[in-house]
Image (cartoon, rainbow, N blue to C red):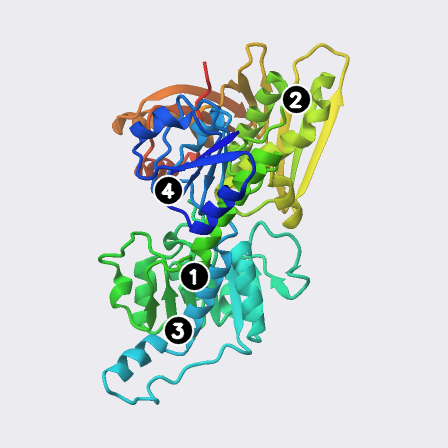
Amino acid sequence: MIRVLVADQIAEEGLAKLRSARDLAFDVKTGLKPTELAPVLGEYDGMVIRSGVQVTAESLAKAGKLRVIARAGVGVDNVDVPAATAAGILVINTPDANTISTAEHTVAMMLAAARHIPEAHASTRAGNWDRKTFVGRQLMGKTLGVVGLGRVGTVVAELAMSFGMTVLAFDPFLGGNTALEGRVRVVQSLDELLPQVDVLSLHAVLTDDTRNLIGAAQLKKMKRTAVLVNCARGGLIDEAALAGALNDGAIGGAAIDVYPQEPPKGSPLLSAKNIVLTPHLGASTEEAQLAVSTDAVDSLLDYLQRGVIRGAVNVGGLPASLSDRDRAYLDLTGRMGAILATWSGDGIDRITVTTHGGASLTGLGQTLGLAALAEVLAPHIEGRLNLVNAGAYAKQRGIELLHASHVSDREFQEVVTVRIDRRGAVHQVEGAVFLDGRPRVLAIDGYRMEMVPEGLLVLIFNDDRPGVIGVVGTLFGDHQINIADMFLSRREKTALMCLKIDGTVPESLLEQLRGSPAILSVRTVGLASLGR
């Protein structure tokens, strides 16, 4: 008998699906604190949650027979996903359930801004009849620019084309010159997109690369009549720059549903001209709330009853036939991909995984490629990639996933190389699992080393000249930050310092490092700790 815990309130239709499932019993226990959840969690095969319950590492310490956590919604911030993965628990969510609602809200915001609906409504309710002031613009015949052609961006594009709009898209992870069967033209840069559009709609994931994606410089490139719409993530826009552009008439209007701080107390957008503001309503429809509940239950039942994985956000679906050494190489390759992710913010054309050495890795190349690809792309996309969906994502976006194996009779260590290519630029990391079972990075872009990839890494490429190490050490010391380990490697006239750091590194220190004349670039990578 399968047992399921429903730890948050879900729609009655979701509960009905559980009632009708064969050989399954469920309990509804909401409002449990982590200390209350921990003693009972191991009694269940699966758990359905929303955002109310916190599933912490402590809750999962005695996970018992728990196999899957189904999140009714997109975010999994209330789940300790690494702890769940370490315990062999699959974490799934419902990424498609609110797609239509968010896309429809985006189009509604376009219309509201183009036709001045909020202001006209307020004026009419006040007893006025001012048609001249609220003359708007129609969408038909205008050009929409979509930044991020993922699930929501694709539906927005489809809806916009039904209005007779021309749609352009910018997505660094989208291959080819067109999308949606040739109906959407893909441009190669944001700067190319901005001057061409009458409406700009943002659908990108928020990362360090996309934070303040639209700032003063970008707003200056837009038409003075253009409208900016953001129903994705608040941090994509520099709010002060947008407020200034609106108040100065530099752009025609804006429609905003999301904010860096919610509620947006003190935001300059609250007093800006020609703006429509809503309180994060993108997914707030009855249909979306119903869909997240039923989709979560369906996915949970698929996994528990049939072994089918949908909406996975971690690597809980690894094949049972993998050996411990196979799993170690999968983990290593993922960590190498995470290092390469620091170079993949502009997208990639190709990822190549090459194995060298004994025959044991020959059949693992494709799986290693998926593990690396998932980590290379994960910081830059909406949702979370893993072994389950990375291949389909690459195929959809025109990213080549290649693997090669070189078997030799010579007795030397197995080695894996992961390489990414983007418009002629190449970066690669080489690594191996040693006989002690622990992974090592052996080279980064040809700089040789022997480094266990875990914790917070700071990669500093610099001119190879006296005094640079001293400058770096002094700056870290001034900030009271301990360098736990350091690896140095030299090539011709340049060098790489790879620092392992205790704690965190503030942005102010990174800026000081980047401002040093001898330092060429500074990158940070956060990797999970390894079991001892």
Mark seen at residue 8: 4
Look at mark 2 in the image and give the residue it sits on.
321
Of the two numbered discs 4 and 2 on the same chain, state the one appearing first in sequence.
Answer: 4
Q: Report the disc number at residue 218.
A: 1
Q: Quadrant of the C terminus?
A: top left
The disc, 2 or 1, on the residue closer to the chain's N-terminal end is: 1
Q: Secondary structure at mark 3?
A: helix
Q: Nearer the viewer, mark 3 or mark 1?
A: 3
Where is residue 348 shown, x and y percent of the image? 60, 44
Indicate which disc, 2 or 3, sits on the residue closer to the N terminus: 3
Label 1 Cα crowd, 10 Å radius (few <14 / some 14-19 / many 20+):
some
Q: CA distance from mark 2 to mark 3?
A: 56 Å
Q: Nearer the viewer, mark 4 or mark 2?
A: 4
The percent position of residue 515, horizontal first and vertical second, equals 36, 39
Q: Which mark is residue 113?
A: 3
Q: CA distance from mark 4 to mark 2?
A: 35 Å
Does the rendering let one see residue 105? Answer: yes
**As displayed, is residue 7 above or below residue 216?**
above
Q: x%, y% of residue 516?
A: 37, 36
Report helix, strand or loop for mark 2: loop
Left or right: residue 498 versus residue 344 is: left
